[in-house]
Amino acid sequence: MKKQALLVLALSAAGVATAQEVVKIGHVASMTGPVAHFGKDSENGVRMAIDALNARGATIGGKKVKWVLVPEDDAGDPKAATTAAQKLADARVNAVIGHETSGTTIPAAKIYNDAGIPQVSPSATNPKYTQLGYNTAFRVVANDIQLGRALGRYAVKTMGAKRIAVIDDRTAYGQGLVTEFTNSLRQQGVNPVAREFTNDKATDFAAILTRIRAGNPDLVFFGGMNAVAGPMLRQMKQLGINAKMMGGDGICSDAMQPLSGNTMTDGQVVCAEAGGVEEKGKAGMDKFRADYKKRFGIDVQIIAPYSYDAVLAIASAMDKAGSSAPAKYLPALAKVRYPGVTGTIAFDAHGDIHDGVLTLYTFKGGHRTPIGVTK
């Protein structure tokens, strides 16, 4: 009888354990390839959020759940991105954080929309992503319209640039950013002295830089990632182009110095991060950065705090809806107001972040140094 009672208790305990709900958070970014440092940064932010949720016993509708990460690698390739998205849809994840680039985020969005799975990108800035009309698509950073306009104003009004050459890497991100930057210039009565393009895997820029040199630019604006921008900066120096470089968040990391072959000089590069915090949020961001370094032994690149906030905003929406089922918590996510480390996470009718903040940086001693916050 005693053994039977113990068996009943054991089975009851096992039943409680197996009854605990598992919430699967998918994450997709480039974990291999030239921009893998950004992808790993993004995934680390998700890991920190999931660890925090599990550590505090975060509940949904009063019920404790187990939060797990389901990671995928899209290598920064649009075709691989759709494959990864389909895998996450088939795995019936409850939400997706990603993708990293606009070129991977946009094609994957249809798959998540068809599956009814909310997708929150912590880094894709091309306006087309939230213009697709999918109610499952969100982003927690400002878009290229805001970013391009702000950089255009800063280039002309603050830096005093008069002869500006523009280059893009032919990705959705690069082209979108250059288009909005160029629109901003023209609104100020400035026309680029040169318009060139490369690709996101290029290493030789002699031809386009030689053509640009003929226009004697004082600023080269590049729409693309630092894996291309760094070597381009080195070759600009070799060709005697003494212009400054400007770009978006794709070039806004300390990896620029080694990628440039240590040729980047203080103040030569100006970039903007589609995010950042105002003065009142600095203490929280500083703590996040310190916690991140303690956890992973490296500094934050760019994306980690945004992917971290994306997870916690989703968790907040799930709790408010009392369910992790995408169809049930999606309306709550659209109306969420979550006080994150990057600011308040709240979305407009298109899924764009409300009142997105932009942070301008330059580099000193090879390290990013903030020079201003704007909207």
Image (spheres, rainbow, N blue to C red):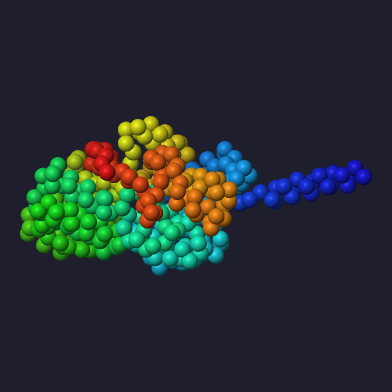
- Residue drawn at point x = 43 percent, y = 39 percent: 339
Q: Is residue 61 visible?
A: yes
Provide residue 343's location: percent of width, then percent of height.
38, 40
| Residue nearest the observer in this picture, 170 or 255 | 170
**Residue located farthest toward the right when viewing the structure as drawn:** 1
Closer to the camera, 1 or 373? 373
**How many dots with numbers?**
0
Residue 109: x percent and y percent? 42, 62
Residue at position x 14%, y 59% in the image:
209
Q: Quadrant of the C terminus?
A: top left
Tell me where residue 61 appears, x and y as whole percent.
60, 45
Q: Is residue 341 left or right of residue 59?
A: left
Q: Position of residue 207 (x, y in %)?
A: 15, 64
Q: Residue at x 37, y 51 (%)?
A: 348
Residue 243 can be seen in this image: no
Q: Is residue 7 left or right of residue 363?
A: right
Location of the N terminus by quadrant is: top right
Q: Taking 45 as reference, is 329 left or right?
A: right
In this view of the protein, which residue sits in the foreground, 125 or 294? Answer: 125
Q: 137 or 43, which lies in front?
A: 137
Q: Residue at x 24, y 46 (%)?
A: 271
* Residue 213 vertical position relative to residue 47 in the rendered view, above or below: below
